[in-house]
Image (cartoon, rainbow, N blue to C red):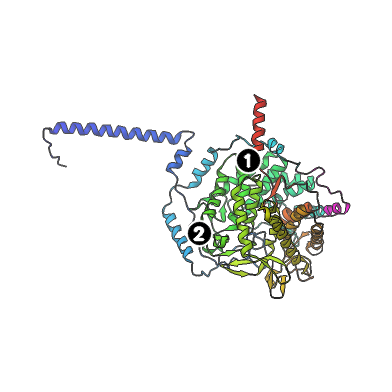
C-alpha cells in the first residue's frame, strides 16, 4: 500500500502515530468487550440479556390443512377418545386421533398473509426465546409478597371449604340422593383403579385402560381429575390412593404432543384445586413444574399460544384441522384462571402477563358485530373465518371472562367489560326463540344463522346466571330469566329423548325443536354441561325443579350408562337399545358427578362466595389481594 506523504510530516513520524492509534483502539475495544461480557455473568443480568436476545423463535404453523367443516364445526376442545365419528371436541367429544385432511381449500386473504408472515418470522429466527423467558420467570418477582402463604389464604376465605357439616343437607330425601351420587363416584373410581390404574381413562366394557395422545405422554388423567371430587365427597381412602400416585408416579418429564388446553384445564386445574383444598405442598411443586413446561406455546409473533405443545422440547404448532394454522378461541381463551393462580403461587408475573397479552390483542382487533370468531391466527393476529359459537370452539372463552372477574374479587374490570360486551353481542345476534317458545343459542357464520345448539353450549345457562348480579342494574333480572330459559331448553333436549339423556347437538328446524336430526349428533358421552347449569341455577334461585331435573339425570345415567364395570357413553339417546362407546371419560368423575353432588348439598360446600370452578369443574379460590396484604402487614407487625 502506498501512503501519500502529508505536508510537514515525515514518513517515520506518521507511522509512529498510526501505531499509537492502533494500540489505543485495540485497548479500548478490549475494555468494552470485557465490560459487556461481565454484564452477562452478573447474577441479575437476565433483563440485560433480554435487551440483546429478544428476538422470537417461531415454530412452524400447520397451515391450511382443513376447513372449518373439517373441524366438524361443533368441536371445542380436542379430547382423544375413541368414538365412531373419529373426531374430537371441547368437553370431551371422543376420538381416536385428530387428522389433517388432505384436501386444501383456497386460502382466504387473511390466511395467505398468515403464511407469508410465518415465512418472514422464520427468516428472522435467532436464539430460542424459551431460554430467556425461563430465566426471566425465575428472576422476575414483582408481586407484593415474597412467598405464598397457605395459612393467610385460608384466613381470607369467608367460609370453610367443606362447609359446616361437609355440606350435608338436612332434608332426608336430598341427602339420600347425594349419597347415591357418592356411590356412583366410588363405583366409577373402584373400577378405574381395578382395571385402568395409572392410565388416562377406563374402558368399562373391555376392562382395560385408555391412554390416548392428548396429554403428551402424561398419565393418570382420571386420577388428577378425581382428586378434588374424592376429597369433597369424603372418600378419603380413595383420595389417599390418588394422592400417593401423584406423589410417586406422576411423571412430568414426558416428550409427547399435548393439547395445551387439555393439560391446562385437567392437570394444572386439578393440581391447583388439590393444593388449595388440602395445603399439600407436593401438589404445588408439581403444578409449578408443569406450568413452566407450557410457557413455550406462547412463543409466537403475537403471543397467542398454539394449540399443541411438546412438553419435552417446547416445540408448538397448530391443530392440523384448524383453518390456516389457527389457534382456537376456546383453547387460548381458557387459560386465564389457572395462569393467574400459577402467578399467585409462584409470585412470578410471567404467567399473568401471558394471558393478559391475549386480552390486549383481543381488545385491539375489530370484532364483527361485537362477536368473537372461533379461529385466530397466532402469526398475524387476525381472525380466520367468521364462525361464532357459544358451544364447541368458543364456549369456555366466555365462561372465563365472567369467572376471571369473579375470581379477582370483582376487581378485574377489563374482564367484566369484555364479558358484558360479548353477552350483549350474543343476545343481539345469536339468542333465538323457537315457535314453541324455547330460547336457544344459534351459531353464526358470517351473518347467517345455523339454528343448532350443542350440548356444550348448555353450560351458558349457569354462566349467565352467575353473572346476572353484576350486570347493569336494570338488566339483572333479565339475565337471570335468560339463564333460566336456556337451562329449560337444555332440559327439554333431555326429556325429548327415549333415554332422558341429551344428544350432542340439537336443532330447531321447522317443526323440530330441541331434537337431534342427524344420526351423528345423537350420542351422549357422559357430558356435564346441562347438570352444571342445574347446579348453578339451584344455588341462585333454590327452585326445587333443578334438583328434580338433576335426579332425572341420575336415574337416566344409572339405567343407560352404568355397565358392569363402570359408566360408558351411549351412541344414540333416542333408542332404548343401548350401544355403549366403552369409555368412562375423566370429566365424568371431575364434572358430572361433582356437579350432581353439589346440587344435592348445602350451598356452603365450596361456597360460590369463595370459589369459582374452572371449565373442568376444579374449584379455584377467589383471590382477595387486599385481605392477603392486610394479613401480611399484621404478621409483620407482630414479628417486629
User: Tag 1 or tag 2, which sits nearer the N-term?
Assistant: 1
Q: Is residue 357 above or below residue 319?
A: above
Let me know if residue 525 appears in the view: no
In the rendered image, residue 59, in percent from the top left (x then y), is placed at 49, 54
Q: Residue under circle 2?
A: 382
Residue 612: which disc?
Answer: none
Q: Which residue is outermost to the top?
A: 640
Residue at label 1? 345
Between 445 and 193, the one nearer to me in the picture: 445
- Label 2 sits on a secondary structure element that is loop
Q: From the image, which quarter does the N terminus lie in?
A: top left
Q: Which residues are magenta?
A: 161-180
Residue 254 located left or right of residue 480: left
Task: Look at the image and say whether residue 166 sits in the magenta stretch.
Answer: yes
Q: Residue furthest left?
A: 7
Residue 180 figure quarter: bottom right
Closest to the camera, between mark 2 and mark 1, is 2
Q: Is residue 427 in view? A: yes
The answer to if 304 sits in the magenta stretch is no
- At 49% from the left and 43% from the top, the residue drawn is 132
Left or right: residue 397 versus residue 498 is left
Residue 214 image position (x, y, % from top left):
62, 57
- Taking depth in this image into account, of 336 and 463 the one nearest to the observer is 463
Residue density around tag 2, few if under 14, some if 14–19, many if 20 or more, within 10 Å: many
Q: Residue at x 63, y 40 (%)?
A: 345
Viewer-nearest residue: 39 or 277: 277
Up the image or down, 22 lies above or below 544; here it is above
Amino acid at each position: 500500500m502506498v501512503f501519500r506523504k502529508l505536508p510537514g510530516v515525515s514518513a517515520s513520524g506518521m507511522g509512529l502515530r498510526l501505531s499509537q492509534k492502533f494500540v489505543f483502539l485495540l485497548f479500548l475495544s478490549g475494555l468494552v468487550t470485557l465490560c459487556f461480557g461481565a454484564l452477562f455473568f452478573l447474577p441479575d443480568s437476565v433483563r440485560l440479556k433480554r435487551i440483546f436476545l429478544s428476538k422470537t423463535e417461531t415454530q412452524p404453523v400447520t397451515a391450511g390443512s382443513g376447513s372449518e367443516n373439517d373441524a366438524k364445526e361443533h368441536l371445542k376442545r380436542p379430547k382423544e377418545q375413541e368414538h365412531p365419528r373419529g373426531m374430537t371436541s371441547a368437553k370431551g367429544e371422543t376420538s381416536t386421533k385428530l387428522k389433517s385432511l388432505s384436501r386444501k381449500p383456497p386460502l382466504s386473504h387473511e390466511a395467505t398473509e398468515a403464511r407469508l408472515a410465518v415465512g418472514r418470522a422464520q427468516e428472522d429466527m435467532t436464539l430460542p426465546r424459551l431460554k430467556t423467558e425461563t430465566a426471566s420467570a425465575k428472576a422476575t418477582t414483582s408481586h407484593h409478597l415474597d412467598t405464598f402463604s397457605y395459612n393467610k389464604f385460608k384466613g381470607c376465605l369467608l367460609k370453610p371449604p367443606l362447609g359446616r357439616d361437609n355440606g350435608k343437607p338436612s332434608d332426608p330425601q336430598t341427602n339420600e340422593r347425594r349419597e347415591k351420587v357418592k356411590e356412583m363416584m366410588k363405583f366409577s373410581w373402584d373400577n378405574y383403579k381395578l382395571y385402568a390404574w395409572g392410565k388416562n381413562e377406563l374402558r368399562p366394557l373391555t376392562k382395560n385402560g385408555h391412554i390416548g395422545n392428548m396429554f403428551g405422554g402424561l398419565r393418570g388423567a382420571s386420577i388428577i381429575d378425581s382428586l378434588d371430587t374424592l376429597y369433597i365427597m369424603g372418600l378419603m381412602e380413595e383420595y389417599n390412593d390418588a394422592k400417593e400416585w401423584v406423589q410417586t408416579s406422576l411423571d412430568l418429564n414426558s416428550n409427547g404432543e399435548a393439547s395445551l388446553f387439555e393439560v391446562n384445564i385437567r392437570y394444572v386445574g386439578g393440581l391447583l384445586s388439590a393444593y388449595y383444598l388440602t395445603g399439600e405442598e407436593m401438589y404445588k411443586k408439581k403444578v409449578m413444574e408443569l406450568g413452566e413446561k407450557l410457557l413455550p406455546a406462547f412463543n409466537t409473533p403475537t403471543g397467542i399460544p398454539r394449540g399443541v405443545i411438546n412438553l419435552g422440547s417446547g416445540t408448538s404448532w397448530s391443530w392440523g384441522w384448524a383453518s390456516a394454522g389457527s389457534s382456537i378461541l376456546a383453547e387460548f381463551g381458557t387459560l386465564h384462571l389457572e395462569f393467574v393462580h400459577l402467578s399467585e403461587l409462584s409470585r412470578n408475573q410471567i404467567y399473568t402477563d401471558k394471558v393478559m397479552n391475549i386480552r390486549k390483542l383481543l381488545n385491539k382487533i375489530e370484532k364483527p358485530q361485537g362477536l368473537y370468531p372461533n379461529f385466530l391466527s397466532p402469526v398475524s393476529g387476525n381472525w380466520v373465518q367468521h364462525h361464532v359459537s357459544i358451544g364447541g370452539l368458543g364456549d369456555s372463552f366466555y365462561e372465563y371472562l365472567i369467572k376471571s372477574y369473579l375470581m379477582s374479587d370483582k376487581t378485574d374490570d377489563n374482564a367484566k367489560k369484555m364479558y358484558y360486551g360479548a353477552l350483549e353481542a350474543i343476545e343481539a345476534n345469536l339468542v333465538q326463540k323457537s315457535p314453541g317458545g324455547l330460547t336457544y343459542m344459534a351459531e353464526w357464520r358470517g351473518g347467517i344463522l345455523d339454528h343448532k345448539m350443542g350440548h356444550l353450549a348448555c353450560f351458558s345457562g349457569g354462566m349467565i346466571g352467575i353473572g346476572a348480579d353484576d350486570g347493569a342494574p336494570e338488566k339483572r333480572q333479565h339475565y337471570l330469566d335468560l339463564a333460566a330459559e336456556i337451562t329449560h331448553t337444555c332440559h327439554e333436549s333431555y326429556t325429548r329423548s327415549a333415554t332422558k339423556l341429551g344428544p350432542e347437538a340439537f336443532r330447531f328446524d321447522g317443526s323440530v325443536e330441541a331434537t337431534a336430526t342427524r344420526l351423528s349428533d345423537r350420542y351422549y358421552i357422559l357430558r356435564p354441561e346441562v347438570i352444571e347449569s342445574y347446579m348453578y341455577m339451584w344455588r341462585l334461585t333454590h327452585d326445587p325443579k333443578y334438583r328434580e331435573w338433576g335426579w332425572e339425570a341420575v336415574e337416566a345415567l344409572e339405567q343407560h350408562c352404568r355397565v358392569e364395570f363402570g359408566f360408558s357413553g351411549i351412541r344414540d339417546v333416542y333408542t332404548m337399545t343401548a350401544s355403549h362407546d366403552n369409555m368412562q371419560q375423566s370429566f365424568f368423575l371431575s364434572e358430572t358427578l361433582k356437579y350432581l353432588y353439589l346440587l344435592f348439598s348445602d350451598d356452603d360446600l365450596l361456597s360460590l362466595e369463595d370459589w369459582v370452578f374452572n371449565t373442568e369443574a376444579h374449584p379455584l379460590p377467589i383471590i382477595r389481594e387486599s385481605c392477603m396484604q392486610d394479613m401480611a402487614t399484621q404478621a409483620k407487625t407482630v414479628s417486629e
